[in-house]
Amino acid sequence: MHRRLLHAAIGLVFLTGTLVAVTRPDDQALDRTAQRWVERTLKALTLEQKVGQLFVPSFESTFLSTDSEEFVRLAELVGRYGVGGLHVFGGSQAVPDVLLGAGYGAVLLGDPLEAAATLNRLQARATVPLLNTGDFEAGVGFRIQGATLFPRAMAFGAAGDERLAFEAGRITAVESRAIGVHVNFAPVVDVNNNARNPVINTRSFGEDPAKVGALAAAYVRGLQAGGMLATLKHFPGHGDTDVDSHLGLPSIAHPRDRLEAVEWPPFRAGFAAGAAAVMTGHIMMPAIDPQPDTPSTLSQQAVSGVLRQEMSFDGLIYTDSMGMKAVAQMLPPGEAAVRAVKAGNDIVLHSPDDRAAIDAVKAAVGRGEIAEAQVARSAERILRAKARLGLHREKRVVLDAIADVVGSRAHAAVADEVSQRSMTLVRDERQQVPLRLPRDAKVLYLSVLDYPGWSIAAPSRVFLPELKKRWPDTTGVQISDRTTPDEMALVRVMARERDAIVVSVFVRAASASGRMDLAPNTLQLLRDLSRQTTASGAPLVAVLFGNPYVAGYLPELPAVLLTFDFYDRAERSAVKAIAGEAAIGGRLPIALPGLYPAGHGLDR
């Protein structure tokens, strides 16, 4: 029944007053009414209003009073400055910037009703409909609580099924449109071929350009089937960096032929699938633009030259967030925005100071530094995108309908299938997976964290209780880089008294963290337990959540299961896999240097 309901929802979105058919955004040609709307609207816009269309500020989708300073700021950007759209973030909380013992997480999830209500109120104030965006790489649930959260892209690579990628895109689109978001900043088409990439990692489908392109194209088609625009990112390719552009300016020194062979095929596959937008990345590529300290975002050679002219892309070009340090620590907001528009970007995203950025671009047009014709072309592309989505007919959503669309069990079933099929067993030297333990076995469970500060879905909150359902005499211990030597010694003693050890390793390659490893003393503990259980014969099974490359630092572990993901769904899938309740058949979408090639995986 869920499958029938799921397919019945294709092409529908809840808008004000009625349930209406969504205009498929892959229908590039506008009908006569939409075309006339674009022409009339463009003609009626002043130069200042056209410039405003080129900017997308952001807000957090937690409750905003109409009288709050934040809502007043947004209302001014929409009403006075005429911005083209708004970007929907989750939420955040203030945390103390202290040394010694700080383990607080600042990131929170937003709320679907609050996101939609805020967007509705701002749409009502907009002369031109807002084209709203979201960073929903892993589904709307990636940023918004209660919505469907899919596994990370690399899990799709491990599952290797284009049908699942299509369905994930379609479901994400249906839920996004229900809350008033029209453009997804996904899929990530970066080819992650650098094991030390601190920011892409599991956000990539894998390291094979053809497979990345095929899964990305399927996801693009799914988004479009659900009535949403897809954005390929991060052009010209962020997969082979070892610097996080949230923290600094990475550089890729590969020659053009390497870019053509590795980095760009997934972009071309996404274009062929009809992707409506591209996001430029804060990455230096001397083979494209040799000017020093020039990220591709601000490079005319990269944006207008390669993307527009050589690749003939005529869709929307968004900058990556202009608040990222790769740009923000180098240029003031106004100058950065001017350079981004001059380079050929249509839309400046998330400036640290939207008003200063808009004013600077207006001034640059006034003095002839930016041609009015270029601004008009960008404004027309933006208006055409709005018309393709039917926003000229209706721009607000029905709040009462959101609960009927967002976070359904039918949607969750698809995410569950992806998760279970992505489980990848790379090593089982003692043939101990699945675990064959009596129900009264004494199990030691280690929840191994890279570092504290997990504010969304605390690690092991599902894994541990699920393990206890199978083996009630399970003792859980959490260790991290904060664990003392005495505590480590206690774990070693406990391990000798247990029939089996299950280890979950949680390592983030998270934006702006600059970290992606376990602490040395934690690695040593796991190596010691591996030797200890080799002598005793007790089972030791390790499950890696997040960064899969951590396996390369622990070749001693006798059994390793990779999930390529985090949080509740991945934890539940992993327990089912090691308990023998679900088949294991995932394949590595990346090579583990020195251990296993891409494509490796054991079946159970």
Image (spheres, rainbow, N blue to C red):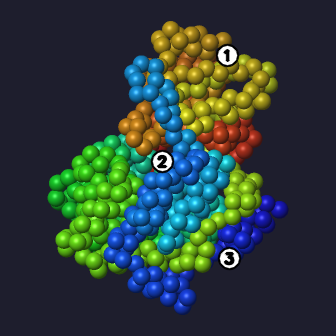
**At 55% from the left edge and 17% from the top edge, which residue is drawn?**
532
Can you name the residue that lies furthest to the left here? 291
Task: Give the image location of residue 241, x and y in percent.
Answer: 33, 48
Callout 1 amino acid: Arg
Q: CA distance from mark 2 to mark 3?
A: 37 Å
Nearer the observer, disc 1 or disc 3? Answer: 3
In-image side of 572 versus 28 (left or right)? right
Most extreme residue toward the bottom is 32
Q: Secondary structure at mark 3?
A: strand
Q: Amino acid at mark 3?
A: Ala
Q: Earlier in the sequence, mark 2 or mark 3?
A: 3
442 relative position to 590: left or right:
right
Compared with 385, 418 (above or below) is above
Task: Say which mark, if any, is on residue 69.
Answer: 2
Q: Where residue 288 is drawn, which disc sits there? A: none
User: Measured from the top left, where is residue 67 in percent x and y?
Assistant: 54, 50
Q: Which residue is mark 1?
A: 498
Q: Nearer the viewer, residue 519 or 328?
A: 328
Q: Which residue is mark 3?
A: 21
Residue sitting nearer the eye, 351 or 324: 351
* Label whose residue precedes the other's in the sequence (1 or 3): 3
Instruction: For the residues labelled 2 and 3, say whether their Cβ atoms are less than 8 Å apart.
Output: no
Identity of the amino acid at label 2? Glu
Relative height, residue 386 to residue 318 (above, below)? below
Query: Which residue occupies 55% across, 78% down?
Result: 392
| Badge 1: residue crowd in 10 Å (few <14, some 14–19, many ≥20) | some
202 in relation to 520, above or below:
below
Question: Secondary structure beneath disc 2?
Answer: helix
